[in-house]
Amino acid sequence: MIETMRPPQNIRREIIDVPCDDARLALHVWRPQHTKGAVFYFHGLQSHAGWLWEVGPRFADNDIAFFVLDRRGSGISPGPRHELPGADTLLDDYARAVAAVRQTIGESTPLTLFGHCLGGSFLAALLCDDGFTTSYDSAVFCSSWLGRMHATLGVEERAALATGPGTELWDAGLRSSDFTDEVKYRHFIDNDDLAVRQVTRRSRAVLLDLERRYLDPARRPRAVPSATFVSGMTDPIVDLDAAHSVFQQLVSGRGAQMKFPTDKHYLFYTGVSDDLVDWTSTHTLLQGVNRGA
Amino acid sequence: MNTQPTSQNAPTSQDDQWQNHWQARRDPFFQECLAARQDLLADLKDPAAAQARVLADLIDIGAGSLHWKEQGYDAVVADPSTFRSVLPVMRYDDYAEQIDRETRTKGGVLSCSPVLRWLKTSGTTGTPKRVPYTLHWLLKYRIPAMKAMWGTYLELHPEILAHPWATLDTQTVREDVYDFVHGVEHQAISNRHPQINSRDWNPPWYTSPWFGPDTPTSHSGRMYHRVRHLVGRQLHYISAINPSTLVSLRDLIAEFGADLVRDLREGTLEGRPYAEPDEVAARHLEGVLAQDEFSLVDVWPSLTLYSCWLSASAELYRPRLEAVLPGVAKLPFMSCGTEGVTTIPVDDTLDSQPLAVSQAYFEFVPAEVPLGELLDAGERIETLLHDEVEAGRDYHLIMSQGNGHARLWTGDIYRVDRIVDGTPWVHFTHRDGVFHSFTGEKITEGQVTQAIRQGLAAGGLDTGLYMCGPRWGGLPSYAVVVEVPSPAEELDRELSAGIDRELSTINIEYASKRDSSRLAGLRVRTVRQGAIAAYVESRRQQGNSTQYKYKPFQRDSDFVEAVLTH
């Protein structure tokens, strides 16, 4: 558990190569002196590990090793911008990275998989993927509109998207004002030259494919040990009711829902950030309690 | 030590918070500083062990970084003695690409520690530098250095913690930051706001009303608040970095004396209700202001100590400091820059301090070696370690710091004064390539040239011969003479303002010193074309030497009259 009486600790910040077939992806880690738990973070469409410069150190100061994989084409990882690889490649990358994290922290350290926004969709698909066999202890979906494309696109639109090869760019229409009220962070988001704000039509088909994989009732994940959906009270980007519904289907109705007092989308750039990190930290650590000892 | 506010006014409810903080932090701060001093003193007696420890730490924090792995520097893990043969000597600009990457990742590129801030200081081309301020550097180096220095101050002058109004600390400011690099604050190292965590710099006066971010950000505004809060109190100590700050403090009291007296008498701060009226203090200050050449000791008879830089060009301020602070004991500030700490005072020696062997891994190159040329030519640089330097000689300083700046050529020249217990005692003499610095502005010849060129161009004039030199006075400044087709007083004024503006843009430290009235504006005198050439020729003939050359940069401003009257 967290040592509450010690002063802030000297944590490490490292960037590790994860070999994934033809690429070496950047796995970012903020590491405490003694790791008691770990969080693997799935970033969203435009963000990357460089967005978490305040979140990572706080997790690590809570004795939680915090890992973020820059997806192919995101952050400092190689790969064409605006382009997602196929769903199989994408999930294979994540599976390898999570396996590498598990190997690093050891089998007995509790591990939370944390998907933010679109990262929640990647996480959901990974949990339903037969190729993902690494043990984990809890899953957190944060401000994730699970099943968004199926909820907002008609059957014909989805069919057209799935079959059309297009390289034309689609603008996600993300506005920093939906993410946060704070000028500092809005300025950062608006000027982040590593952010991906557009993806190809082809990439959208990949996203649709991923959704199918976790919306298919025949492909439910193995029992999720602990699942929580976290968001603000409202979200300017996400239909929370729709997202909650898909989340509960995914975890067989056993998921917890938690709301923090903000109406913005990117909780880590709001006043609830520290509370969210602290809750996730304690939640992760508690998964490691050996009740049978 | 006395823990009570002796003769001071009792705290009111509005004062409770900062005074409680002062009381709560006083003893821990005292102990932390003395402990850091003891650690430093122990290292100074065994510098080889300290340097080996620092090198091991630098390798530990560096080896896993992207830059080290990509360049193969991590090979030194197997044999630390290869550090100097594997890693190259670097200038700040050589790190530009890696720093650019690091601004996006906020750590992991140059070292395995999160970057918490980017430290801002003037660069060579007018673009402020971005020096990574990492958690590791903060915890293991920068804060311990501050504490060790204050440990020396406290050891020698414990009265500086006698009560909450005993110390006026101008070394540090707390200002809100509005400049960011990819979301991370970009600020001067002297701005220690906001506090990063509880192990960040936290002196007892951290929340004092004259120290916090609510004070005005202008130099005169902040100074006025400091004085208003402390005048009439038993002030013992004024801490500064630049001696010019102390001189300007006295000048500010002279300039705003009437306002201070009124605020004291009416219990206001800049006219707004603030405290109980203090007629006694008002009368005392009135009496002081009536003296033509009052000193800060007249304002605060309780003063027992001041500290600031007192060597190199700062030494030229000593006569002025003697006038402003007569009979007051003085201690030196550490030799340091944004890039790192070089020396830390351990006693009251003014002209030399021990190399801070626990702060960085230090290397030296004899000053006569043209280091810049060798680096430009890509040549290997042979360096000396702390136990290979000789007393009486000057050296370029190369240091490896815990923020990932390994083998950084600082551009500073240090003289080794003596060796004590194996540790060199050194003092800063000048910056390689710097033309002059009155008060930390570190003007280079290139910057002056660029400012003159741009200032003249703005007026539609080509750049011909010019001369520039420092002019000492109550408020120092730079004097410039330029050749133009039609000299005129009006043009002098225009060019003075224009070139001063350009120099302020190019050198942010110069701008800061101008804004805080520690430097007067640069003054330009225009002369007819050929006037400087004629003056140079006359000097050559006077000296009967073929060696006399046109030197645009002079050590003083005597040339102004000489050129004008030639």
Image (cartoon, coloured by chain):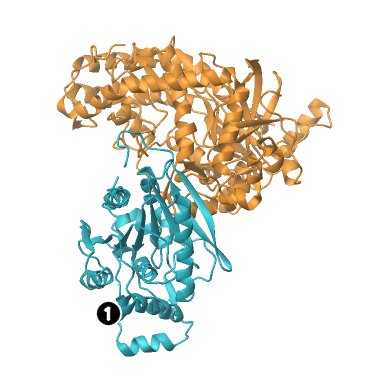
Chain colours: A cyan, B orange
Q: Is residue B48 visible?
A: yes
Tell me the subunit letter for badge 1: A
Task: From this view, report whether residue A279 is shown above or below residue A117.
Answer: above
Residue B407 placement (x, y as % from top left): 64, 38
Residue B46 placement (x, y as % from top left): 60, 19
Q: Name the one closer to the observer, A140 or B68.
A: A140
Residue B401 placement (x, y as % from top left): 56, 36
Query: Which residue occupies 58% across, 68% down?
Result: A22
Q: Is residue B479 visible?
A: no
Task: From this view, report whether residue A197 is shown above or below residue B274.
Answer: below
Q: State the SS at label 1.
A: helix
Q: Name the one closer to the observer, B436 or A184.
A: A184
Q: Name the one closer to the observer, B193 or A225.
A: A225
Q: Amino acid at mark 1?
A: Ala
**Disc 1: which residue:** A151
Residue A137: name its quadrant.
bottom left
Q: Quadrant of the C terminus of chain B?
A: top right
Query: Which residue occupies 27% across, 24% down?
Result: B24
